[in-house]
Amino acid sequence: MMKYLLMSTVVALISCQDECANVVCENDGVCISGDCECPAYYDGDRCEIYNPEGVKGEETGETGEHQCDNEGK
């Protein structure tokens, strides 16, 4: 019984770890649930990409290209 209680406590503590503990968001980005929420004009996984158009795009690869809608925006 004691072994079960100890294991349950360890599992509970591990599952309550801060998902943002090792996440560094740049340019005043804010970590929420392990992901960076970027301010206007910044994009990327860690808000490291300056985007002067201020429109968040979906990155398609390592080249930094973004997908556009049908009007080329």
Image (cartoon, rainbow, N blue to C red):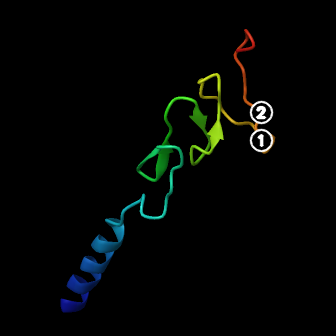
Q: Image point 62% across, 42% down: which residue?
A: 44
Q: Sort mark 1 into few (<14), some (14-19) or many (20+) by Cα contacts within 10 Å.
A: few
Residue projecting furthest to the bottom: 2
Q: Which residue is mark 1?
A: 61
SS under mark 2: loop
Q: Is residue 10 left or right of residue 54?
A: left
Q: What kind of residue is marked 1?
A: Gly
| Camera-nearest residue between 52 and 24 | 52
- Compared to 59, does 35 lie above or below? below
SS under mark 1: loop
Q: Which mark is residue 65?
A: 2
Q: Image point 46% across, 53% down: which residue?
A: 34
Q: Is residue 54 left or right of residue 23?
A: right
- Compared to 60, does 24 lie above or below? below
Question: On the image, which quarter does residue 69 sit in?
Answer: top right
Count the labels in the image: 2
Q: Position of residue 52 (x, y in %)?
A: 65, 26
Whether tag 1 and tag 2 are in contact, CB under 8 A, the answer is: yes
Could you tell me which quadrant the C terminus lies in? top right
Question: On the image, which quarter does residue 10 sit in?
Answer: bottom left
| Camera-nearest residue between 25 and 11 | 25
Residue projecting furthest to the left: 1
Q: Position of residue 29 (x, y in %)?
A: 47, 43
Could you tell me which quadrant the N terminus lies in? bottom left
| Camera-nearest residue between 5 and 43 | 43
- Compared to 13, does 55 lie above or below? above
Q: Image point 59% across, 46% down: which residue?
A: 45
Question: On the image, which quarter does residue 19 sit in?
Answer: bottom left
Q: What kind of residue is marked 2?
A: Glu
Q: Image point 64% across, 29% down: which residue?
A: 57
